[in-house]
Image: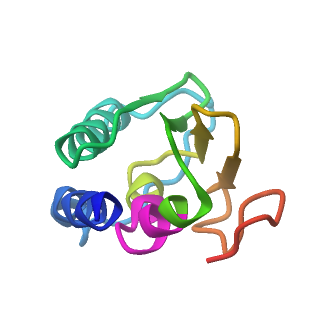
Amino acid sequence: MKAAFAAALITATLASTANAEPRPAPASMTTPAIAPSFAKSVERALLSSGISAIVYQDEKAKLTVFAYLNQSLVYQLAVDAKLLEGAHRSGLRAVDFFDKGGAGHWIFDLSGGVPRCDIRKRLCL
């Protein structure tokens, strides 16, 4: 239930960027100006749905979602909420889903567009 609600909230949050053209990742590997607001929007959507999460981006344009995650929730956030597409449109180079409980870690490389699978091929969309 929480996952579906989170997906709906994130989808609504990302709707404002739905028609935006993808931004190329900056050559300097610095975080695009839009990324901090994108990270905060995703974090607020997750928190609003009852999922305790910390979402931030680093200087290499990687978005990290740090929460209690499982493969099903990561799939829902990536596919149903279109989080990877929104991150790519925001100019981010990667999305890192990191489980607080240590049970999982999924990294999606966005440098070539929205990927079909995480870099370890543990989760394919």
Q: Is residue 78 left or right of residue 111?
A: left
Q: Which quadrant of the figure contains the C terminus? A: bottom right
Taking the magenta stretch, the answer to whether it contains residue 47 is no
98 lies above or below 80 = above
Q: Which quadrant of the figure contains the N terminus? A: bottom left
Q: x, y percentage for residue 16? A: 15, 61
**Which residue is pictured at 54% across the width and 24% down the height?**
58
What is the span of residues highlighted in magenta in the rendered image?
75-85
Q: Is residue 74 left or right of residue 19?
A: right
96 lies above or below 111 = above
- Which of the 4 image quadrants contains residue 36? top left
- Which of the 4 image quadrants contains residue 120? bottom right
Taking the magenta stretch, the answer to whether it contains residue 80 is yes
Q: How many marks?
A: 0
Outermost residue, right side: 120
Q: Is residue 8 left or right of residue 59?
A: left
Q: x, y percentage for residue 17? A: 23, 61
Q: Magenta part mainly helix, strand or loop? A: helix
In the foreground, 73 or 17: 73
Q: x, y percentage for residue 50? A: 24, 43
56 lies above or below 106 = above
Q: x, y percentage for residue 104? A: 70, 46
Q: How is the image coloured?
A: rainbow
13 lies above or below 56 = below
**Which residue is pictured at 57% across the width and 31% down the height?**
100
In the foreground, 99 or 18: 99
**Which residue is pictured at 63% across the width and 38% down the height?**
27
- Which of the 4 image quadrants contains residue 11? bottom left
